[in-house]
Image (cartoon, rainbow, N blue to C red):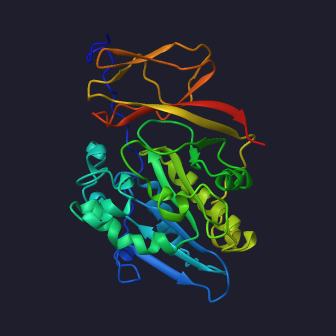
Amino acid sequence: MISRDDLSVPPLSFRLPAPDISAWRAGNTGTEGVWHFDSGAPGRRVMVSALLHGNELCGAWALKGLLEAGLRPERGTLTLAFCNLEAFDGFDPAHHDASRFTDEDFNRQWLDERIDAANTRERRRAAALRPFVAQSDWLLDIHSMHEPSAPLLLTGLQPRNLQLARAMRSPEFVVVDAGHQDGVRMRDYGRFGALSDAPGHDTRSLLIECGFHGDPASRAVAQDQCVRFLEQAGALEADSLTRQLPGWRLPDAPRQWALEVTGSVVARSSAFRFVAPFTGLEVFEKAGSVIGDNDGVPVVTPYDDCVLVMPSVRQARAGVTVVRFARRAPLH
């Protein structure tokens, strides 16, 4: 068994400053933090969301940049949402994990019965945002990660989202997963979670993990993904995006990998520990490789050539996913 003292979690330097969004906080919809623009022309109803977790700043920087640029859709509508403002208000770079949420993880509450209960601050905020999510056709939800890692684009299980990830040509690693055991993400809410591509389910929803929360590079990834997503959604032409958001688009990924999540490890308690300081995308050649200890139970890789996706013990407690196992294949 691994002693809790053997592998302490090292602190990470938080170098991305918190954006000042005071000028944009009120929104223009009557719902705090939510902006909505209508082109008046036919097109998709597109939404970009940020700050589902109060310490994930890169998306807030991207939304602030879109608003400061005066970006407006050329077709359809565009909704921009700063989501968990109350958690963000408590942000402290020295204790950034403490501002992830106020009462509970906002990105696990996207079931109508949880939202309707309205018994936590996150659920009440979800109720305020639900109409905007429900009416959207395409959703980009911007996040960042507990550990330093390459960006990950999460598509869910829907082939239509995987096709969109391929069309966006970035980032390099695309995660195909079913979500979390302890709740439903915004990107899986309602029509977005439908596996069918039948009429009425012509939606797209992506969740981008832009890198470590405190890495300034995460802001550049968030900006790049906004440009790519808005272009693919048909909200604006590529040349309009280049002109209005100069420098936002990064080079295409040299290749893309699909990481198909086959299972996850849920902590039994906060005592969960890995055998090494994994940060993500580590590949284990042999099945049965020991990667951690879950309250005295060894955690092993289930198959050869197994990839670890988003391993972290920074939020470890009973019921929390601490790592996912994935198979990898080139995304063509």
- When the figure is inspected, residue 249 is found, relative to residue 39, above or below; the finding is above
Residue at image location 66% in from the left, 74% down from the top: 235
In this rendering, would 119 be left or right of 211? left
- When the figure is inspected, residue 8 is found, relative to residue 137, above or below; the finding is above
Residue 80 visible in the displayed image: no
Q: Nearer the viewer, residue 305 or 26?
A: 305
Q: Nearer the viewer, residue 147 or 265?
A: 265
- When the figure is inspected, residue 249 is found, relative to residue 233, above or below; the finding is above
Residue lying furthest top in this view? 1
Residue 63 visible in the displayed image: yes
Residue 227 in the image, given as x and y percentages of width and height: 64, 63
Quadrant position of the C terminus in the picture: top right
Residue 96 in the image, given as x and y percentages of width and height: 30, 46
Residue 63 in the image, given as x and y percentages of width and height: 49, 66
Q: Nearer the viewer, residue 43 or 245?
A: 43
Choose top left, top right, bottom left or bottom right for residue 160: bottom right
Residue 16 in the image, given as x and y percentages of width and height: 42, 50
Residue at image location 47% in from the left, 60% down from the top: 189
